[in-house]
Amino acid sequence: MFARLFAPTLEVSAHCDLPCGVYDPAQARYEAESIKAIIGKVADNDDPDFRTRAILIKEERSNLVKHHLWVLWTDYFKAPHFEKYPQLHTLFNEATKLAGGGGGTKATFDAEKADQLIAKIDEISEIFWETKKA
């Protein structure tokens, strides 16, 4: 009986707790820009406490990039988008790997990786805005 009282009557999914329909790749780019800035600051600072904090923040920002990209990939883009832009799956895969721990920005202080990540986000953003015009 209690199960019936508390059973959901409508199932929804969204990138937040309310399906607001608000999506923007700028969220991922903002975090990627932060990663690049952190990499630059660490290069100029030998303080171990600062470096430890920078590592933690950079890893958090890398996770946020992946989160924002995944939301776009799984929630915003639909089958017709992937048909029109067949490179989308590859772009998202490459971008999330660039933000990840296997040699991406989460695991390294490689400014080139951060630049590559920003470039992938920009490619995704260009397609995103084309779909919004349609």
Image (cartoon, grey):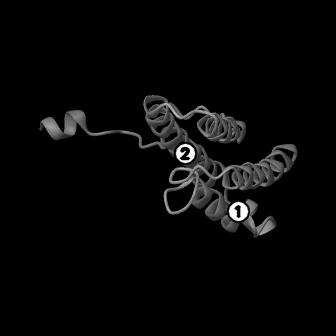
Percent x, y of residue 5: 21, 33
Residue lying furthest front: 46
Residue mark closest to the camera, 2 vs 1: 2
Secondary structure category for the residue under label 1? helix
Q: In the picture provided, is 110 more to the left or to the right than 83?
A: left
Q: Quadrant of residue 45?
A: top right
Residue at point 59%, 57% (across, down): 96
Percent x, y of residue 56: 45, 37
In the depicted view, which residue is nearer to us: 122 or 109? 109
Residue that mark 1 sits on: 91
* 54, above or below 131, in the image: above
C-alpha span from label 2 to label 1:
16 Å
Residue at point 49%, 31% (across, down): 47
In the depicted view, which residue is nearer to us: 26 or 112? 112
Residue type at tag 1: Leu
Residue that mark 2 sits on: 62
Secondary structure category for the residue under label 2? helix
